[in-house]
């Protein structure tokens, strides 16, 4: 009788799942050892990578950046497949969104802010974030803006730290100017606070924390950035996914196979008799269409958002339920929503821009506080923590804005007309004729003395991502929330069953049943595609080593 090969099923065809499949399939000696299968609940591969087109331009609905090229496996793959150059223009491929010299900061009401007003508080914000991320020592290098005397309290949030630093910066100035400075009703302090809040909104999209008050300060310094520049992939992030999947034979990836339940056997194995029950394979997968599949090992790569929903359901995604160390880590960690909004300029607007008239800037927006009597009520609340709106590359007809948290979820519920009206109202407030001031030079963006026709800027159509409401993701990426720590990310990565004396009474360790991969399982590279890549490689190597195959 021929012995059955161990069957490995990978749930999810994103970066983590396809990296694991790629490694398991190509590892020396593994082809004759395993049965391998990838099941994907959606109709496409890629997960939170989704390259698309809009307005004649290529865009990324999800992952966009290679965060540092030094040591990045994603950059290495992109180089190997020649994906870093393209004749067709691509979102942010000219580096415009990362070049501060291209940005123009406007205050609500149509006031262009000169660099001498914007740069000091921007420098303070950057410095505070460098300190939070462990790049600088706040107490030693900038004692005048040191929060908590350089020794942040336990469970301090990044948001609280930033605001303490801003208050300390203001307190360090001998003469705090509360007088009007020629920008309508803006004072110097209110403008600085608005610029600081603008940077906070950008940071929210970087981390996916809807509120920086929820982002843990202590864990921020554990996050590791690769050295070198941050770049986009000219031929699209999907090229990375296609490269990982290209070695897999037809049929190995099964689309439209959504797993609804995972049955496993944490205490049903002994060395003499094997597994109790009718089947020798310990894991049973139930699918939405009613079918089932048995497996020896399952690598779960679904998002943290799906896991959070899975442990809250009455029936539960896992049977028996996951042990408490795992569910507590899932519950404590943060998983936020970040959405991108693309707007195509109308042909008339784009023609004017391409001819050099009313050129749409890389617009950074400083808003009045929500409680300010001077805020313009025509601007909808969901636009007020949006930091920027800009062409995706020089002279593109497509503009891009980022949303995080409650605003990102609200965006998903709005129809196209509501979005266009809201963005138009915002643009009209910022890009009307800039007011002249005695203190600073101004720049006139619109002809005439009043706003007419949105400064000649009108929108033809919109496209938005909807990661929060997509049942296959339920959010965008993970962060370490206040109350959690990097230890929880390590616990996310632990395979099951966990036989170390506390989670099971069994005296022997069975073969690995459920393994976990994905960006939320990597302690130092969470929230990134390369973190997902490393996690998939980790779990593949775990199984290869278990079966004494070659792993790297």
Image: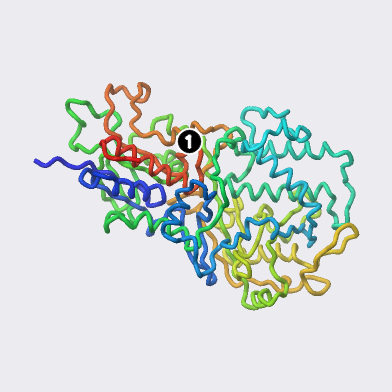
Question: What colouring style does the render use?
Answer: rainbow
Residue 365 as seen in the image, left or right of residue 27 = right
Picture coordinates of residue 521, whole percent (x, y)? 45, 39
Judge by depth and name the residue closer to the eye, 3 or 213: 3
Asked if residue 420 is positioned above or below residue 313 in the image, the reply reads below
* Residue receiving disc 1: 489
The answer to whether residue 35 is left or right of residue 321 is: left
Residue 152 appears in which quarter of the rendering? top right
Tag 1, which secondary structure? helix
Total count of labels: 1
Residue for point 29% across, 49% down: 26
Q: Quadrant of residue 262?
A: top left
Where residue 58 sits: x, y (%)? 51, 66
Q: Quadrant of the N terminus?
A: top left
Q: Is residue 462 above or below residue 259?
A: below
> Camera-side residue: 515 or 294?
515
The foreground one among 409 and 236 is 236
Examine the image and state in which quarter residue 364 appears: bottom right
Q: Is residue 449 left or right of residue 469?
A: right
Q: Position of residue 274 (x, y in %)?
A: 19, 30
Q: Position of residue 488 (x, y in %)?
A: 48, 33
In this image, 396 relative to 52: left or right? right
Circle 1 packing at 10 Å, graded few (<14), some (14-19), many (20+), is many
Q: Which corner quadrant holds the C terminus? A: top left
Residue furthest left as drawn: 1
């Amino acid at each position: 009788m021929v012995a059955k090969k161990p069957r490995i099923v990978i749930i999810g065809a994103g970066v983590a799942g396809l990296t694991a499949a790629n490694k398991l399939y190509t590892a020396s000696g593994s082809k004759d050892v395993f049965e391998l299968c990838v099941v994907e609940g959606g109709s496409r591969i890629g997960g939170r990578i989704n390259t698309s087109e809009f307005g004649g331009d290529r865009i990324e609905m999800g992952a966009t950046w290679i965060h540092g090229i030094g040591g990045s496996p994603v950059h290495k793959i992109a180089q190997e497949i020649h994906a870093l150059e393209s004749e067709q223009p691509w979102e942010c491929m000219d580096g415009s969104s990362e070049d501060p010299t291209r940005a123009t900061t406007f205050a609500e009401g149509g006031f262009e802010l000169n660099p001498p007003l914007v740069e000091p508080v921007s420098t303070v914000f950057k410095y505070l974030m460098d300190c939070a991320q462990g790049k600088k020592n706040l107490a030693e290098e900038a004692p005048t803006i040191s929060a908590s005397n350089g020794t942040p309290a336990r469970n301090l949030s990044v948001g609280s730290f930033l605001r303490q630093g801003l208050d300390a910066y203001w307190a360090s100035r001998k003469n705090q100017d509360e007088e009007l400075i020629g920008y309508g009703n803006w004072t110097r302090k209110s403008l600085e606070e608005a610029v600081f809040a603008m940077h906070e909104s950008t940071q929210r999209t970087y981390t996916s924390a809807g509120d920086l008050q929820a982002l843990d300060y202590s864990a921020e310094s554990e996050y590791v950035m690769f050295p070198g520049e941050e770049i986009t992939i000219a031929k699209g992030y999907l090229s990375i996914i296609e490269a990982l999947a290209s070695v897999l034979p037809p049929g190995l990836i099964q689309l439209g196979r959504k797993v609804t339940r995972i049955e496993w056997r944490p205490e049903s194995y002994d060395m003499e008799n094997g597994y109790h029950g009718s089947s020798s394979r310990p894991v049973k997968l139930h699918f939405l269409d009613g079918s089932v599949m048995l497996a020896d090992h399952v690598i779960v790569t679904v998002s943290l958002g799906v896991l959070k929903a899975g442990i809250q359901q009455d029936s539960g995604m896992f049977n028996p339920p996951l042990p408490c160390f795992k569910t507590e880590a899932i519950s404590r960690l943060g998983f936020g929503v970040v959405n991108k909004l693309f707007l195509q300029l109308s042909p008339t607007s784009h023609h004017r821009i391409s001819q050099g008239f009313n050129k749409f800037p890389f617009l950074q927006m400083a808003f009045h506080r929500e409680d300010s009597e001077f805020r313009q009520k025509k601007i909808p609340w969901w636009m007020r923590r949006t930091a920027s709106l800009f062409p995706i590359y020089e002279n593109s007809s497509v503009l891009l804005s980022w949303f995080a948290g409650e605003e990102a979820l609200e965006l998903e519920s709005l129809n196209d007309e509501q979005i266009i009206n809201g963005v138009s109202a915002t643009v009209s407030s910022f890009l009307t004729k800039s007011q002249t001031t005695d203190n600073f030079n101004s720049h006139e963006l619109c002809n005439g003395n009043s706003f007419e026709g949105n400064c000649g800027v009108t929108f033809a159509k919109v496209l938005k991502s909807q990661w929060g409401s997509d049942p296959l993701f339920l959010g965008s990426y993970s962060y370490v929330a206040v109350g959690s720590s990097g230890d929880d990310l390590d616990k996310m990565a632990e395979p099951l069953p966990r036989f170390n004396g506390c989670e099971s009474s069994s005296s022997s360790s069975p073969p690995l049943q459920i393994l976990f991969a994905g960006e939320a399982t990597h302690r130092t590279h969470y929230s990134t595609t390369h973190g997902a890549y490393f996690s998939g490689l980790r779990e593949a190597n775990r199984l290869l080593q278990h079966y004494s195959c070659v792993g790297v």
